[in-house]
Amino acid sequence: MFDYLIVGAGFAGSVLAERLATRSNKKVLIIDKRSHIAGNAYDHYNEEGILVHKYGPHIFHTNSKDVFDYLSQFTEWRSYEHRVLASVDGQLVPMPINLDTINKLYGLNLTSFQLEEFFESVAEKVPEIKTSEDVVVSKVGRELYEKFFKYYTRKQWGMDPSELDKSVTSRVPTRTNRDDRYFTDTFQAMPLHGYTKMFENMLSHPNIKVMLNTDYKEIINEIQYKEMIFTGPVDEYFDYKFGKLPYRSLEFKHETLNTESFLPAAVVNYPNEHAYTRVTEFKMLTGQKHSKTSVVYEFPRAEGDPYYPVPKPENAELYNKYKKIADQTPGVHFVGRLATYKYYNMDQVVAQALTLYKKLTEKVEEDKTIAEIEKIVKGKSLNGSAIKISTNGSH
Ligand code: FAD
Ligand code: UDP
């Protein structure tokens, strides 16, 4: 009998497996329908011996010391600050838009102060910023919006930025200084030996059994467990009873090239040309030395593995219907990017999983207290009827 059946061996499932097994001495079965652990963060050495990320580039960054310290128990790190170039008007310029981007694009020599004035002069007045178009045009105006955001977003999401929640393009800032880093978080690093190695360290504990190549539906009636932690798509769990939640997919085209170096930056974005959105050269993320180099191109797709929840109002409404029944499903806890339909980065999923662990263990303590109370009051109720103590689900 397992204490927990955990569906999905990505960040959400693996953090919970690790905590429950090592800190609460729980017996855990963690399963994944894929042939490997680490979920979308999975990396592996390809046939040429180059470390690649199967599901696209994963760069770790966080402002949370707690999350960073937690993961540091399972990996050493390689300091890494991510930089991206965008191909616009025949030039490669820094993305996010910064002082150098504008100077290079327009052949100018503005100062930060002048750039601020320029942005103010071109920014559109938007009474209330609601959509992903509003966010950008209200800061840098329509021309830059069209050059950098409009067509990338259409390609990536299959819809116009005006249909998407503001949170999507808000992920990418605009700067008037020369900082060309993609992220500005306090902690920015790559696991020194890769993500999969870090996950192996998290899951190597006698209380944790890992089962791969298995959909939970195949075994759900065969094994005994007390509670479930579900990290797959929430609509799938409930057999799509309110309709399908849209998730955006990608097709990854991996290539190994017979040259030592290929790109001028780890990632080049193509807002306007090509069917793919971006190309990544892995050695620039990992620091690996090799005479060849491996790259991946990302082609957005409507169908395929669910990678991105699609942030827009009607989807949030539909998700809320699922959340309502999820909250009312005793003994099943929903966590992670797919199960809570949130466009979360890795660190946010780790934080969410650590929070759920805390809730679960507080409940364990609560259950212990209830068991003690039950023992004490057993047979002592005045009218002889059983005393019913209700436990509150913690999800
Ligand atoms: P997942 O990693 O998706 O894990 C869920 C697991 O559940 C999967 O392995 C799946 O196979 C399994 N599963 C689902 N259904 C079933 C079932 N029925 N039975 C058994 N198993 C099942 N974040 C960053 O912080 N930095 C980045 O640079 C970054 N880059 C990204 C690039 C791309 C292209 C993508 C798609 C995401 C990126 N992310 C990045 C986000 C990151 O991948 C997620 O935040 C994180 O992996 C989510 O972890 P999770 O455990 O919630 O989900
Ligand atoms: N985006 C864009 N142009 C770019 C980079 C990003 O329009 O050059 C928009 C696009 O809508 C994208 C979103 O900003 O989906 C978030 O970008 P991010 O790089 O965070 O995407 P992710 O790495 O999660 O795919």
Image (spheres, grey):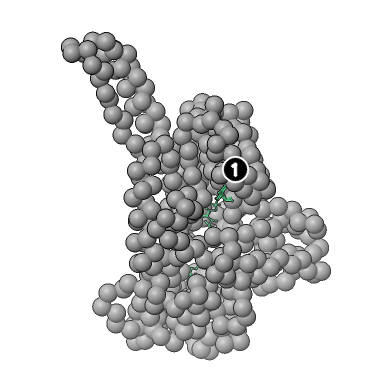
Judging by the rendered image, the residue that carries numbered circle 1 is: 218
At x 73%, y 64%, the residue is: 294
On screen, residue 74 above or below 41: above
At x 43%, y 71%, the residue is: 169
At x 18%, y 13%, the residue is: 383
Q: Position of residue 192 (x, y in %)?
A: 65, 49
- In this rendered view, identify the residue nearer to me: 38 or 233: 233
> What amino acid is at disc 1?
Glu
Is residue 198 in view?
Answer: no
Q: Is mark 1 within 8 Å of ligand 1?
A: no
Q: Position of residue 108 (x, y in %)?
A: 50, 88
Is residue 297 in view?
Answer: yes
| Left or right relative to 141: residue 152 | right
Determine the image quadrant of residue 132. bottom left
On screen, residue 183 above or below 332: below
Q: Position of residue 379 (x, y in %)?
A: 27, 10
At x 61%, y 71%, the residue is: 299
Ligand 1 sits in quadrant = bottom right
SS for tag 1? helix
